[in-house]
Image (cartoon, rainbow, N blue to C red):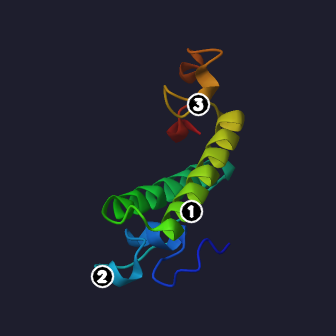
């Protein structure tokens, strides 16, 4: 999926495995390894991590360039996508954190689900 028209940015997954969303700031310091999740739960967790990383990197950029509308739009798009994937994960596998929306009705539910590393 194409996330942006800016040629200076990696796609979120490519930025994640490189540790930098910005092509012009990227300097390879070792071998790049693809992540191969073993099941759907691990795939969703990886996708959440990818989107979280992309949002953090863009947030840091926006701290310096707060008026860049293209980056603001991309940040909002990725943040929204992360929220959707997080919701899907929590509907299928339980909450990931104590401030999860899934815990509003049953605050103790986080302790009843298997931990991500137990699956």
Q: Which residue is mark 2?
A: 27
At 42% from the left and 64% from the top, the residue drawn is 67
Q: Residue 103, relative to residue 118: is it above or below? A: above
Residue at the image point whose x is 36% and y is 84% from the top: 24
- Mark 1 and mark 3 residues within 8 Å of each other at the beta carbon: no
CA neighbours of label 3 inside 10 A, class few (<14), some (14 to 19), many (20+): many
Q: What is the CA distance from the residue labelled 3 to the residue labelled 2? A: 36 Å
| Residue 57 location (% of width, % of height) | 39, 62
Residue nearest the observer in this picture, 15 or 58: 58
Sequence-first disc among 1 and 3? 1
> Is residue 66 visible to us here?
yes
Q: Please state which of residues 68 and 14 is positioned toward the viewer in this rendering.
A: 68
Sequence-first tag of 1 and 2? 2
Looking at the image, is mark 3 or mark 2 earlier in the sequence? 2
Residue 20 left/right relative to 49: left
**From mark 1 to mark 3, how far is it between C-alphas?**
28 Å
- Would you say 53 lies left or right of 36 here? left
Say which quarter of the image contains residue 104. Answer: top right
Q: Residue at x 44, y 58 (%)?
A: 53
Q: Which mark is residue 56?
A: none
Circle 2: element type:
loop
Separation of residues labelled 1 and 2 (CA atoms) = 26 Å
Dot 1 surroundings within 10 Å: few (below 14), some, or many (20 or more)? few
Quick one: quadrant of the C terminus? top right
């Amino acid at each position: 999926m194409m996330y942006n028209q800016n040629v200076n940015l990696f796609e979120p997954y490519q930025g994640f495995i490189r540790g930098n969303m910005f092509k012009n700031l990227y300097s390879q310091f070792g071998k790049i390894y693809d992540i191969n999740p073993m099941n759907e739960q691990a795939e969703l967790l990886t996708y959440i991590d990818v989107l979280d990383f992309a949002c953090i990197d863009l947030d840091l950029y926006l701290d310096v360039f707060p008026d860049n509308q293209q980056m603001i739009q991309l940040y909002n798009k990725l943040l929204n996508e992360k929220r959707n994937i997080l919701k899907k994960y929590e509907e299928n596998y339980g909450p990931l954190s104590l401030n999860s929306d899934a815990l509003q009705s049953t605050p103790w539910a986080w302790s009843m689900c298997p931990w991500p590393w137990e699956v």
